[in-house]
Image (cartoon, helix red, strand yellow):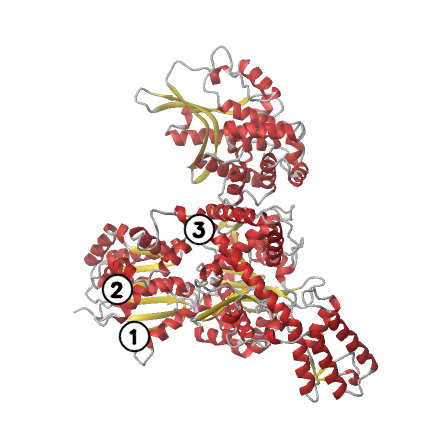
Amino acid sequence: MKPMLSHSMLVANAGSGKTYALTTRMVTLLALGVDPRRIAALTFTRKAAGEFLDAVFARLADAALDDAALARLAAETGRADLGATECRSILRRLASDLGGLMMGTIDSLFARIARVFPLESGISGDFAILGATDLGAAREEAVAALFAEYAGDARRFDVFIDLVRQQSRRRSERDVFRALLEAVTRFHDTYLRTPPGVVWGDRDRIWPDGCALLEAGPPGAAADALWSAIETTHGDLAEEAVAQWRAALDEVRAWKPGQPWSAGLKKFIDARLCKFSIDRKSGEEYLPIGNARRARVHLNEQVRAARTALLHALVRPEIENLLRRSAALHELIGRFEDLYEAGTRARGRLTFGDITALLAGRVEDPGWLAAAGYRLDARLDHWLLDEFQDTSRPQWRVLSAFIDEVVQDAGGERSFFYVGDTKQAIYGWRGGDPRLFFEIRNHYNQGGEIRIGEGSLTESYRSTAEILDAVNAVFGGIGAVAEDLGFPARTVSEWEEAWRPHRVSTRTRDRTGYVRWTMVSAEGEGQGEEDPDEESLGEADPQDLEIVRILRETEPWRRGWSCAVLKRDNRKVAAVAARLQAEGIPVAVEGKSNPCTDNPLGAALLLAFRCVATPDDRLTAALLAGSPLGRAVLADGEERFREAGLRSVAAAGFAATARGWIETVGVAGEPFLEQRAADFLSAASAFDAQRRPGDGLLRFLAFIEQFEVQQPERADVVRVMTIHQAKGLTFDMTIVAGLDALVKDRSAGELVLDGTDDRPWGLLLPKADFARQDEVLAGARERLLAGSAYGELCAAYVAMTRPRFGLYLVTRTVTARSTAKSFARLLALTLGHAEPWLERGDARWFERNGLRAGSGGDEGTGPAGPRALTPPLAGTPRPVSPSDAGDARGAGIGMGDAGSGGAALGSEVHAALATVEWIGDRPPPFSTCSREARKLLLAFLAGAEAGPVFTRPDRLVRLWRERAFDVLIEGRWVGGVFDRVQIEDGPDGRPLSAIVYDFKTDRGSEATVRNRYAGQMDWYRRAAAALLGLPDSQVEARVIVVR
C-alpha cells in the first residue's frame, strides 16, 4: 500500500535549500511509482524550470552510480528499498516522457491549455506569443490610432492633451505621443484588472454612504467661520498673527473653484490647515505664527472643527477633479484597449498576460470546466509550485480550478506542495501578490481541519555566520523600529508572519566571513533625507567611488571569487558599470541589454538612420552633425547623404549601409566600439533576415531601439545588476549600494483599484494630507503605502542574502539625530552607527579562504589609473577585431574626420558591389548610384584588381554575398558579415577551397589599408573555413581596395 501523501506549504529562507526540497518531493513521487506525466511542477522562469529538471536528473543519476548518494536518496524519499536499478528505470522513463512532462513555467502551462482548448478558452484560432519588440510596436500602433481619433475634434483634443500631460510623470514632456504611450503602459494593466462594468471615478461606488468631503460648503463661508472661531477664542491674539490670518483668509475668499491655487494659498493650506505644532510641556496642539506665544492659535474644539470645514471646502474641488480625470482616463484607456484588441489580440497575437486573463475569465464557466478543466484535472494528480510568493491572483484563479479538487480529495493519492518566501516578494509591480501564500493555507485549514501542513527551511547552506547574524539583526525586529521608520502596521504584521530566523548550517559554520557597512556623503547631500531617485547622476557618485575602493581592496576577479554589485535600477547599474570600466576593472552588466544603444557609436548610427528617415527632423540632423560620424557623412550635405542612404538600404539592406558608415568613421584600435560595431551589424543583419514587405526605416529604428541580447555569465569579471536580476543567484561577495528610501509616499496621482470583492472601485488618489480627510481614501492610501514599504523591505532582504563570504553595504550618511526613513537608518537602528564604517568578521576573508580553482592568479590586473569614462561591456561578446590580432590602428569614433562624404559613398559602393554576381566585357551601369559612386565603381571594375574577383571562373564555384555569420572558433563567438566569398566545389558538391574578399573604401595606400585589416582578414578566413568545413590552409582572405 502506498503511503498517504500530504499537502504542504514550505516557507524557505534565502539560501536554505529550496530547490533541493522541491527535487526531493519530485523524486519521492517518482520513487513511489507516480507516473511523471501526472505531475505538474511549475515555476516562474524558464531558467529556473530548466535548473529544476536538471537537478532531478542529477540526483537520480548520482543515486544510480554512487552507493552513498543512493542511501541518502532512499532515506529522504522514505523508500528504504530504493535501488540503483530502479533509479535507472525512473531516469529512462523521465527521458522517454520528456516531451510530455508538465514541468516548466506557469505561463507555458497556460499557453499549452490555450492551444489544446482554444475555443473553450475564448481564442478563435491559432495564436503567437508577442515578444517585447512586437508588443511595443503593437502598443504604438494602437496609440497612433487613438491619437488620430482625438485629433479629429479640436475641443475634445484639447481636453485629451491636458489629461495626457497631467498623467505623465514628466509634466513638462513636450512629446505628447510619448506621454500618451507612457500613460497607456502605466494604466493598461490596471484597466484589464478592473471588473467589467466598473468605471473609475464612480462616486457612488466609492462612497455608497456619502462623502463628507464632497458635501463641504463654499470656501468663503468656511473662511468666515474659521475667523469667527479664532476671534471668539483668541481675543489676545498678536497683531502680526491677526494680520497674517486675515490676509490668508482674504486670499481664500478671492479664490474660485476651478482656478489654480497661488503659491501663497498652497503654503497656507499646507502650513495652517494640514499641519500643526505640539507644545512640548503641555502637549497642546496649536498653529504658530512666529515664535511668540500670543501668536499661537490653539486647536480647541471650535477652531478645530472650523479649520477642518475650511480644508474640506478647499479640497472638495480637487476630489471632484480627480473623479472627472479618473473617469476620463478610464474612457481613454478603454478606447486604447478596443483598438489594441482589434489590431493585436483579434489577429492571434497574445501576451502571456492575455492568456492568463482569458483563462481566469473562463474557470467558473461550466462549459470550460466540463471540457478543458475536467480533462486537465483528470490528468494531473500532483502539483508542485515554486516561488509561490510571486503568483498573481489571476494565475491562482486558474490554478485553483485544478488544485482545489486535489486538496479536497480524501484518497491520499493526490497532493499539493508549494514553496516560497514572502520576504523575497519583489515582483508586486507585475502582479505578484505575496498575501496569497498564507491566505491559501488559512483558507483550506479553516474550521480546525489541517489539510495543508506547514514546514520551514531556516538553515542556510549559502552564507557564513557573520552574514546571517547581520540579516537576523536587521530584519528580525522590524516591529521594534517600525515607528521610527514609518512602516505601516500592515507592513509590520505581514513581515512578522513571514519572518523565520536564519541558522548557519554545519557545512558553512567554519567558513570565514565578513560584513562591512560604510556610509559616504556628498557635498550638499544632508543626512539622507532626499529622494535618491530625484537626484541626477554626477560625474563621481561617492557610493560608486567607495565601490571602486572595495574592489581594489579585494580584487575578486584576480582571486577567482564571484562578485556582484547590486543597484536598485538600470540607470544606476549603467552608471556604476561605466565607472568601474573606466577604472580598469573588468565588468559585465547582467541580464538583457541593448548593445546598439549603450555606446556613442550606436547612438550616432541611430541618428544617421533617423536623419535618413525623417528629413524634417532638425533636432536629429543637428545632433548627428555634432558627432564624429555626422562630420564624416554630412560633409557633402544632408540631401546627398539621405539619397545615398536610401539607395543603399534599398539595394543592400540595413547591415550593409551601417557597415559602410562604420568603416568610414573608423573604430579600429578601440576594442569596446569594435565590439559594439559588430553587435550593431549583427542586429541589423537579423532585421534584414526577417524583414517583411513594408518594413522601412522607422520599423528598423524601432527594432534596433528594442533589440536585446542576454549577457553571458562570466567568472572573471565583476557582475553589475539590479536587485531583481540578482534574485535566485549566489555570489562569493556582494556589494550593495543605492538602497535608500524604505517608505516612499508617492500615492498622489496614483491610480488605485480598491474596495471590496463585491464593490471594487478605481480612483486617482489625492496628495496624502487630503486623502487623510476621508476614511475611504485614507485606507486606500495606507494599503498602497504598506505594499510599497513591504516591497522595499523585500528588496533589501534579497540584496543582503546573496553572498557566501563577503557582504559590503554602502549607503548615504545618517547621524544619530536623523529622522530619515531609509535603509541606512534601518541599519543604524539595528546594527549601530558606522563611524565611518561598521564591520563584523575577518576583513581579509578573501585571503583566508584561498584562491578559487581556475582563478587567474596575478594576471589581468588592468591599468592602474582611471581613463575616460566609457560605457560598460555588455551584450553578446564580440572579441574578434583587427586590434586583437594585428597591428591595426585607427582614429576611432572619438577622433579625427573620416573625410568628405566618405560614409555615404562607402555605403553606396558596398551596396552596389553586393548586387554584382559576375561581369563580362562591359561592367554593369549602376544607374541608381550617385555620380561619384558610379565613377568610382566603374574605375575600380575596369582595373586589374577587380578582374579576378568578378570574372566567372571556368571551374564550378558558388558565391556568398553580404552573408552574415556567427561561429565559434576556439571557444570564442565570432560574428560579422562577409562581403563576398567565392567557393569552389568538387564534383560531389562538397567545398574544396574558398576565397574571402572584403571591400574597403578607406583612403590611403593599398599597403596601408591591407596592413590595417590584416588581423580582421585572418578571422574572416578562419570563420569561412569553420563554416565550410575546410582546413584553414584551403581558405584565402584578401582585402580589395576600391579607391
The mark found on residue 28 in the picture is 2
**Residue located at (70% from left, 88% from top):** 281
Question: Which residue is more in the foreground, 513 or 570?
Answer: 570
Residue at disc 1, secondary structure:
loop
Q: CA distance from mark 3 to mark 2?
A: 45 Å
Residue 168 x %, y % = 60, 56
Residue type highlighted by circle 3 = Glu
Residue 44 x %, y % = 39, 58
Residue type highlighted by circle 2 = Thr
Q: Earlier in the sequence, mark 1 or mark 2?
A: 2
Q: Are marks 1 and 2 in contact (CB under 8 Å)?
A: no
Q: Residues within 10 Å of mark 3 (few under 14, many from 20)?
A: some
Q: Quadrant of residue 498?
A: bottom left
Q: Name the residue that disc number 1 marks.
A: 451
**Residue located at (37% from left, 57% from top):** 358
Q: Quadrant of the N terminus?
A: bottom left
Residue type highlighted by circle 1 = Arg
Q: Is residue 82 left or right of residue 311?
A: left
Question: Which residue is more in the foreground, 653 or 757?
Answer: 757
In the image, which is nearer the foreground, mark 1 or mark 2?
1
